[in-house]
């Protein structure tokens, strides 16, 4: 056995479901591949016809994984109608800003028999709504909804390296369906009812990863990064409470776990983006180099929402100020250090 991976054995015979994965990017492809490996019936949808053809004809997504094959049972389509007709469970692996567009397109196709699994991490720009709430609003007839999150790099999931994830839903039976879909020797699933905290943790850790990257780019040291990560978790917990979630979720896989992964590794786009900003690269140029950076929009949304709720989120606000040119990275770091002393924990 390779010391860095877990060789997959025959999966436990969990009840199979029929899945559609929306989005064949790196994340969607890795999740769809895992579902296929576990014996699920999986169709992945993507708007890129070359990706669809690649998966169907060559069992590869060379755009994302030129050196890796996908499970031979995985199939792809460019038709949203076919994608929805195929599925009992629809897993969303789209950039956060694409959710409103696709949800609107599917509003007349999805029914109460369809369960939804949200893996996108972010908020609606106009009002800071959670993405599960956006889907509920645009597709009110939807069946049960869950969130799948946790410290997971897509590449490592494709390589079958050991991974733990969280499925959150108030619907116990649906949580079991989702967990069974990822019943693999290299994946350990945990469950939660806190669908709100799971989403807040997954979205806000991107902002904290940008902050950690900025500190790294400024060469301010490991002490500073550890401090920002720890205090950042406190901000994530306070925001989760305001949104109706639980602190305990933030201290688990959806918060601390995901933050430890994305705020310490150059495999994280948000961390790499922050590094470039700390080194003096413009926001525009850094985004061109890195690609999608969910933490940029999340920083602005959460800053606005925190102010509306009278919530002090100093690190989130500092990142937002840097990204929108209100302060320089070093000015923001100095501001955080010069704030009035305070107790570490409230109450």
Image (tube, helix red, strand yellow):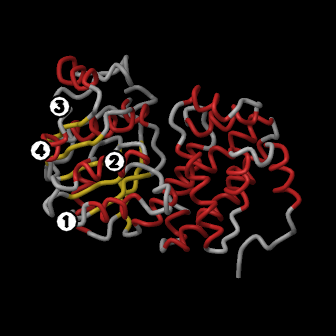
Q: In this view, does 228 lie to the left or right of 174?
A: right
Asked if residue 143 is positioned above or below residue 321 in the image, the reply reads below
Q: Earlier in the sequence, mark 2 or mark 1?
A: 2
Q: Which residue is drawn at 26% across and 56% down?
A: 116
Labels 1 & 4 near each other (Cβ < 8 A): no
Q: Residue 155 carries which label?
A: none
The percent position of residue 244, horizontal first and vertical second, equals: 48, 74
**Neighbourhood count class around disc 1 (C-alpha, 10 Å): few under 14, some 14–19, many 20 upward:** some
The residue to which callout 3 is attached is 75
* Location of residue 222 with respect to 176 vertically, above or below: above
**Separation of marks 2 and 1 at Cα, in angstroms:** 17 Å
Q: Is residue 146 visible?
A: yes
What SS does tag 4 mark?
Answer: helix
**Residue ID for mark 1:** 141
To which residue does mark 4 refer? 86
**Residue visible at 10% across and 46% down in the picture:** 85
* Residue 253 in sight here: no
Q: Which of marks 1 and 3 is nearer the N terminus?
A: 3
* Earlier residue among tags 4 and 3: 3
Say whether marks 4 and 3 touch (CB < 8 Å): no
Q: Residue 229 at x, y = what percent?
A: 68, 53
């Amino acid at each position: 056995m390779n010391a860095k991976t877990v060789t997959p054995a025959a999966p436990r015979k969990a009840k199979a479901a029929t899945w559609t994965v929306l989005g064949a990017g790196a994340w969607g492809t890795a999740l769809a591949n895992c579902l296929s490996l576990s014996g699920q019936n999986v169709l992945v949808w993507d708007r890129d016809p070359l990706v669809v053809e690649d998966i169907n004809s060559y069992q590869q997504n060379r755009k994302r994984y030129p050196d890796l094959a996908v499970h031979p049972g995985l199939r792809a389509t460019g038709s949203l109608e076919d994608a929805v007709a195929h599925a009992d469970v629809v897993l969303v692996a789209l950039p956060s800003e694409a959710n409103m567009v696709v949800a609107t397109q599917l509003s007349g196709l999805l029914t109460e028999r369809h369960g939804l699994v949200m893996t996108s991490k972010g908020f609606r720009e106009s009002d800071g709504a959670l993405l599960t709430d956006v889907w509920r609003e645009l597709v009110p007839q939807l069946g049960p909804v869950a969130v799948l999150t946790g410290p997971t790099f897509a590449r490592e999931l494709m390589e079958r390296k050991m991974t733990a994830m969280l499925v959150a839903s108030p619907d116990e039976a649906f949580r079991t369906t989702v967990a069974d879909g990822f019943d693999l020797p290299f994946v350990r699933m945990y469950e939660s009812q806190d669908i709100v905290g799971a989403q807040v943790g997954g979205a806000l850790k991107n902002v904290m990863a940008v902050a950690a990257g900025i500190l790294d780019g400024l060469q301010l040291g490991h002490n500073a990064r550890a401090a920002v990560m720890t205090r950042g978790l406190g901000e994530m917990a306070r925001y989760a409470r305001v949104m109706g979630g639980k602190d305990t979720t933030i201290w688990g896989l959806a918060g601390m776990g995901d933050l430890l992964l994305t705020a310490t590794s150059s495999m994280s786009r948000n961390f790499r983006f922050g590094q470039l900003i700390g080194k003096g690269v413009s926001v525009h140029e850094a985004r061109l180099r890195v690609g999608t950076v969910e933490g940029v929009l999340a920083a602005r949304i959460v800053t606005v929402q925190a102010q509306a709720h009278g919530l002090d989120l100093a690190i989130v606000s500092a990142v937002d100020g840097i990204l929108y040119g209100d302060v320089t990275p070093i000015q923001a770091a100095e501001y955080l250090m010069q704030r009035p002393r305070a107790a570490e924990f409230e109450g």
